[in-house]
Image: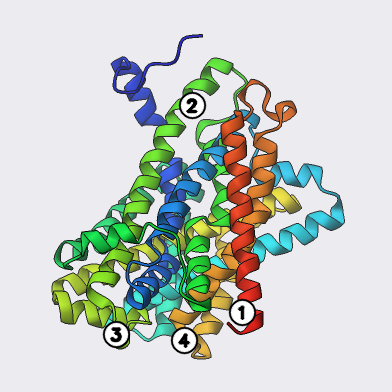
Amino acid sequence: MPKSPSLLAAPPSRVRATMFAMGPAFVAAIAYVDPGNVAANLTAGARYGYLLLWVLVLANGIAVLVQYQSAKLGIVTGQSLPEILGERLKTGPRRVYWIQAELVAGATDIAEVLGGAIALYLLFGVPLLLGGLIVGLASMGLLLLQTHRSQRSFEAVIITLLGVIVIGFMSGLFFSGMNPAEAVAGIVPRFEGTDSVLLATSMLGATVMPHVIYLHSALARDRHGVTTDPVRIRSLLRSTRWDVGGALFVAGAVNISMLLLAAAALRGVEGTDSIEGAHAAVVATLGPAIGVIFAIGLLASGLASTSVGTYAGSSIMGGLLKLKVPLLLRRAITLIPALVVLAIGFDPTRALVLSQVVLSFGIPFALIPLVWFASSRKLMGDFVNRPWLRWSGWISAGAITVLNILLIVLVASGN
């Protein structure tokens, strides 16, 4: 069977169809540039320079494979990953599984609200607790687009915010004085003690995010509808490959830019172990204009990612518990833990980093079922994962699990 022509060589009608079908992956990509990423990447760069750059490169490669498989599962089966799990798990295990998935979604939401609150504080001096409340209310407004208008309207706003994030976090890199030779050396995998492993795990959790593994299958299914036509499915999968590749390229570039900026301009600067301190150092080193752009990017990140996170949580609950809770009600309920963290005065940047560690521990619970189902010929038919994709998924899940076990051992031993 001849191979399909590339997009560049395709007829104009196919190019238009591909562009029209793109969008779900860019919504999912918001989760890869949320405030948790900002905290983890800036902390890693400021503390260890270019040492952990390899983690971001590896994580982004894994993310491309994972998000494509999630979207593929939704397109081929017409079901989301949580729905497929909900059908196959007995009542007890299904509820336990839902609890861990909700804990992951909750950790995500805390990070996103905290990041938005910090951004409002940096831009306007708004107290953190009030800022968290404002972010929650603003995210409700974004969710109204998805509830009362259409997924395309929601996608358009989220993609616009993604553009703001790109400008906000990549602009400073051009003035940072990055050392290319040291950056290339950072691609070689290595650690420097327990704290670097903790940060690497945090960065991994912030990049390959469990809740968006669940969500992308729903986004792709909801956007394209349910079809059993093999020709239509192949066309959608071709568009999805471009969608995922483009979205994750943008997200990866933003994450890498954050670490490179911190490594070049913030390393060794006192106070850069917090987002506020990193912002102050950016202002002092690169000027107030870059500092304002950075804070605006952080605000856009918090607003967009918390809306996408709420959408993901609703998909998880609906699939596993077969319970539909209105998005705005869910947003109001899940806002409470983040506001509590802000009210008690816990260090927001530390909370952001720790939330990403929680995410990392949730990855195998989402990734293993995803690879299993996407590799099932009974479920996927002719669209079952090819051997290279199946084994790439299993190797990724194994590597992440080993990293988590290593973290537990190092922390328990006090090394």
Q: Does the CB distance between marks 2 and 3 fall below 8 Å?
A: no
Q: Report whether residue 28 is seen.
A: yes
Taking the image as shown, residue 204 lies to the left or right of residue 379, namely: left
Taking the image as shown, residue 365 lies to the left or right of residue 115, namely: right
Q: Which residue is mark 3?
A: 125
Q: State the mark number for residue 347.
A: 4
Tell me the element at label 1: helix
Comes first in the chain, label 2 or label 3: 3
Q: Which residue is mark 2?
A: 236
408 to 2, vertically: above or below? below
Q: Does the CB distance between marks 1 and 3 fall below 8 Å?
A: no
Taking the image as shown, residue 372 lies to the left or right of residue 49, namely: right
Label 2 is placed on what type of residue? Leu
Comes first in the chain, label 1 or label 2: 2
Tell me the element at label 3: loop
Query: In which quadrant of the rendered image does the C terminus lie?
Result: bottom right
